[in-house]
Image (spheres, rainbow, N blue to C red):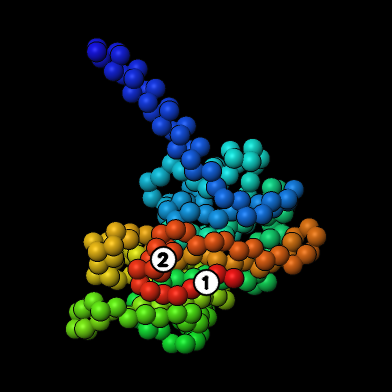
């Protein structure tokens, strides 16, 4: 096989690989009408191009546009490492209307996270955060413990390892707010880098091959920007999150 044949083979392989990959990565659509579309974003998929997302060529905005064959506009942010419900609009005007609801704090978002240790039963974290420009901003997160477990697995000076499944509602929308707040109260999210615990992340990777961040946007509640109808959209947990719940014996049944 000569060089030209090799190059041709590689070129055809790459085309087929990309086609297969994009076909396989069809996004799960949770809701769609002529104004809005909501997806269950996979962990590791960036919403759109940004300096913060690193080196990647795949974006939810592009994949969704190609999937429904319509131009879409993100209505809010969702970290690349976070899975769950993500809202898009089909017109810029509608996107602006939704973003106004976010700015006025008329949108409620709920998250689920697996964290190190036993958290409080209920707590409000009121701890300002500094953004990338150096500005200190108000940041408030409320959470409740859903389940907890203790494994017969020594960790550091402790004879066992403890974990909690928590439900969180951010009252403000700062970058990496939940991740930073949980680290601040010393209950870092499993799989979080750089805000988590390196020792725990290494343990989960080496012992159970868990390498994803255990933070999921499970629900979003808002008013439809056109009909004003109250909307409640829910996103099922990813399989890796469910597997980790089982590993840690954290009992949880989604509503």
Toward the viewer: 74 or 64? 64
Residue 229 visible, this angle: yes
Q: Which residue is label 1 attached to?
A: 253
Residue at the right extreme of this rendering = 227
Judge from the rendering whether residue 34 lies leftward or rightward of residue 159; answer left or right: right
Judge from the rendering whether residue 230 lies leftward or rightward of residue 66; answer left or right: right
Q: Which residue is label 2 attached to?
A: 214
Q: Work out how far the residue at label 2 is from the one at label 1, CA to CA, in angstroms.
A: 16 Å
- Quarter of the N terminus within the rendering: top left
Q: Residues within 10 Å of mark 1 (few under 14, many from 20)?
A: few
Question: Which label's residue is closer to the chain start, 2 or 1?
Answer: 2
Q: Pinpoint residue 236: horizontal percent, then vertical percent.
A: 54, 61
Judge from the rendering whether residue 174 lies leftward or rightward of residue 6; answer left or right: right
* Element carrying mark 2: loop
Q: In which quarter of the image is residue 220?
A: bottom right
Q: In which quarter of the image is residue 155?
A: bottom left
Q: Which residue lies at the image location 50% right of the left edge and 82% below the top edge? A: 144
Q: Pinpoint residue 209: horizontal percent, then vertical percent.
A: 29, 59
Q: Which residue lies at the image location 32% right of the left edge and 81% below the top edge? A: 150
């Amino acid at each position: 096989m000569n060089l030209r044949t090799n190059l041709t083979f590689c070129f055809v392989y790459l085309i087929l690989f990309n086609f297969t990959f994009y076909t396989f990565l069809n996004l799960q659509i949770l809701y769609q009408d002529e104004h809005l579309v909501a997806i269950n974003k996979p962990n590791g998929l960036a919403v759109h191009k940004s300096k913060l997302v690193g080196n990647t060529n795949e974006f939810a905005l592009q994949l969704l546009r190609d999937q429904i064959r319509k131009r879409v506009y993100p209505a809010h942010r969702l970290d690349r490492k976070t899975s769950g419900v993500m809202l898009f609009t089909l017109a810029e005007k509608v996107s602006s209307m939704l973003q106004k609801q976010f700015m006025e704090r008329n949108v409620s978002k709920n998250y689920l996270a697996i964290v190190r240790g036993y958290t409080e039963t209920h707590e409000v974290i009121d701890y300002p955060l500094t953004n990338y420009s150096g500005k200190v901003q108000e940041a408030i997160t409320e959470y409740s413990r859903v389940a907890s477990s203790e494994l017969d697995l020594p960790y550091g000076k402790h004879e066992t390892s403890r974990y909690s499944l928590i439900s969180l509602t951010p009252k403000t929308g700062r970058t990496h707010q939940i991740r930073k707040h949980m680290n601040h109260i010393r209950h870092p999210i499993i799989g979080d880098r750089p805000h988590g615990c390196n020792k725990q992340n290494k343990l989960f990777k080496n012992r159970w091959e868990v390498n994803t961040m255990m933070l999921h946007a499970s629900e979003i509640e808002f008013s439809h920007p056109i009909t004003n109808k109250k909307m409640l959209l829910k996103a099922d947990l990813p399989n890796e999150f469910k597997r980790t719940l089982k590993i840690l014996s954290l009992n949880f049944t989604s509503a």
